[in-house]
Amino acid sequence: MTISRLYLVWFLLFSLTTVTVASKSAKGSYLLFVGTYTDKESKGIYAYRFDAASSELTSLGLAAETVNPSFLAIDPSRRFLYAVNEVQKYKDAKSGGVSAFAIDHQKGDRQPGRVQLLNEVASRGADPCYIAFDKTGKFVLVANYTGGSVAVFPVQPDGHIGESSAFVQHVGSSVNRAHQEGPHAHWIETTPDNRFAIVADLGLDELLVYRFDAKNGSLTPNDPPYAKLDPGAGPRHVAFDPNGKFAYVVNELQSTITTFAYDSTRGALEKLSTVSTLPKDFSGSNDTAEIKVHPSGKFLFASNRGHNSIALFSINSGTGAITLVDHYPTEGKTPRNFEIDPSGKFLFVANQDTNNVAVFQIDPDNGRLTFTKKTVTVPSPVCLKFMSVE
């Protein structure tokens, strides 16, 4: 073989190796956006770069200045970021806001992770606290907490939000007069098959079920129209198992998790059991916040504000039953939203009252958490959202 041919072979092998390494590296590189409350030091949405191989978080600074972006959603194309603005007045109306941003992927002089405001619309209810995409990525669904209502908004191809395609005002109350004097929609998402939208209303102790039309973004009451929680439970957030057979509801006011069997043909929820998120010997005050099922479907996590812990449960894949395994300190106070990174290896906790995000490693065999001793300072963090970077 001539020297030139040897060189060509070497060059091709080197190029292939470089591409393979770069591909593996890209799969472990993510942007982490952090939504906050801006009544103190925070100015809006912050961005970080996360390297899954080293578990290192690198600050990219303030991504966007906006008021109370308490919950975030990233569109499936990873070009746009959406936030609810949790306020009681928007342009003199009793409403919060919904903001759309374009995500800057550029490198070099321009900082990746910065976002540019596209437009804002009224959420049609005070204090919106949750936003999520339907499975087509063409609509965002919003829960208005103080307004006690939900709304659906179309997303245009250029990322702008249109005027609402659906709006439902809830009515009623429940037994806890301090927190359930009226409806308080706290969570809304479409079911895994995108045929229904489920709303957790803390004020009504109900999971309301709507038929969702993905062509026009409409909501129509289902039959049956809701599933009841225990009086005073205060349902906050919901998580489905990967197979879509079971739904788990974290109840804020009673610090419990209720398991439901889900019938996808009828959009019906059957209550199975309720367990506590707290140790038996805990006697202090506590409110739960977030709930997540691990991508493997084997574990469930929930956050306790007061006990300041993440509760770990194992899941019986056949029955959906959950069993408490352990509790883990969150390395801060008032853990709100937490997020499992796309690799499924790490769990990030937003500790609102200690202004930090703590990183834990997840044992793939038993779900147990190990604190990585890595935290970052973020003012009043309340929501975490990952996005892979290619």
Image (cartoon, helix red, strand yellow):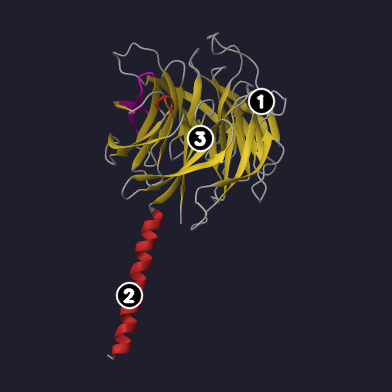
Which residue matches tag 2? 13
Q: Secondary structure at mark 1?
A: loop
The reply to whether residue 118 is visible in this rendering is: yes
Left/right of residue 299 with respect to residue 206 in the rendered view: left
Q: Check disc 3 and give the amino acid type.
A: Gly
Examine the image and state in which quarter residue 220 appears: top right
Side of 123 relative to 232 (left or right): right
Q: Residue furthest bottom?
A: 2
Magenta stretch contains residue 322: yes
**Element at label 3:** strand
**The disc labelled 2 sits on which kind of residue?**
Leu
Q: Position of residue 312 (x, y in %)?
A: 33, 29
Q: Which residue is mark 3?
A: 35
Q: Which mark is residue 125?
A: 1
User: Measuring 53% from the left and 47% from the top, which residue is drawn there?
Assistant: 114
**Magenta segment:** 306-324
